[in-house]
Image: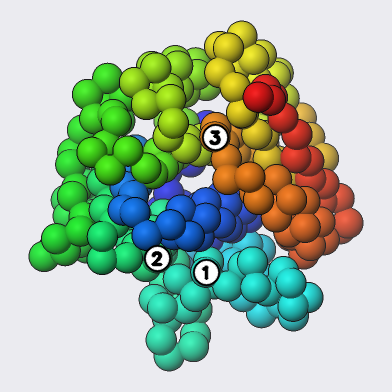
Amino acid sequence: MNYRHAFHAGNFADVVKHIILTRILAYLMKKDAAFRVIDTHAGIGLYDLFGTKAERTGEWQDGIGRLIQATLPPDIAALLAPYLDAVRAQNPDGALRYYPGSPFITRHMLRAQDRLMGFELHPLDAEALRENFAGDVQTRITALDAWKIFGTHLPPKERRGLVLVDPPFEEKGEFARMAKSLVQGHQRWPGGTYAYWYPIKEPREVDAYVKALKASGIAKILRIELTIDSPATPPRLHGTGMIVVNPPYVLEQEMRNVLPVLADLLGVEGRGRWSVDWVAGE
C-alpha cells in the first residue's frame, strides 16, 4: 500500500477524513480556551489537482469533484460548510484546482489563540510544507518521524486539542504502529482527542487493528467507516476509516447524518456503505 497524499489528494477518503477533521475542530472552537492540533503526517499542505501526481490517478474527480458540485440538504450543507469553505478558500476564482491537505484545512479554521504543529518525515515534503507556512507564527513545522512524538510532544501546553494521525502506509506494520502510538499518547495525554485514519483494503488487517484497540483498555473509541465499493481480489482500496478517541459528543450523530449522503454520492453504482460504532464505550 502507498497512500502518499499527493497521489490521492481530494479522493473519497480525503473527503471523509477532512469532514471529520472539521467537525472535531468546530466542536473545539465552541470554547474560548486555546487548543492545539498536532498533525503527525502532514504532507506538503496544498495539492495541485492538475499536477503530475494527482493527475496520474485522477481520484479527486470522484471525491471532492463530485461533492463540491452536489446539491446537499440544508442540514448536511451546514455540517459540511467548514470543510467546503476551506477548499473554496484555495480556489478563489471558483474553479477547482487546488486541494488543501489537513494542515491547510486546520489552519483555515484556527482562531488567533490556537496553534498547529505539523510533522513530516519525507525531506522534500517537509521543506515544501515549511515554505507553504513561511512566516506563520501560529504554525510550527518539524521534519521528524511522527511515531517518535508520542513520547516527547504530549501533552501540549494548552491541554486541549487534537492529534491527527494519517500515515501513508508505505511500509508494513502501520496498523501496529498506530495502535502502539495511541497507547503511548493516551498514557501521556488521556484527555486529548485522537483521530487515526486508515485505509480499508484488506478487512483482516482492519479487524486485527480494531481487536488491538479493544485490548488496549482505552475508553471512548468511535469507529467511522465508509466504503464505496465491494472488496476485490486482489485487494484494492475500497473504503476509508477513522478511529476517534475522546470524540466530541455530537460527532456520532453528525456522522450518522452525513455518511448516508456521502455513500450515495461517492459510492460506485449504488454500492456505497457506511457504519458508525463504538469500539469501546465509557
Crowding at dot 3, Cα within 10 Å, few <14 / some 14-19 / many 20+, comes out as many
The CA distance from mark 2 to mark 1 is: 8 Å
Q: Along the polypeptide, which appears first: circle 2 or circle 1?
A: 1
Name the quadrant containing residue 177: top left
Crowding at dot 2, Cα within 10 Å, few <14 / some 14-19 / many 20+, comes out as some
Q: Along the polypeptide, which appears first: circle 1 or circle 3?
A: 1
The CA distance from mark 2 to mark 3 is: 20 Å
Kindly give the residue lying farthest to the front in the view shown: 32
What amino acid is at disc 1? Pro
Query: Could you say where residue 40 lies in the image, as x and y percent from the top left?
Result: 34, 38
Mark 1 against mark 3, which lies toward the viewer?
3
Relative horizontal placement of residue 53, taking residue 243 as reference (left or right) = left
The answer to whether one can see residue 15 in this image is: yes
Q: Which dot marks residue 82?
A: 1
Relative horizontal placement of residue 22, taking residue 150 as reference (left or right) = right
Q: What residue do we see at 57% from left, 40% from top? A: 247
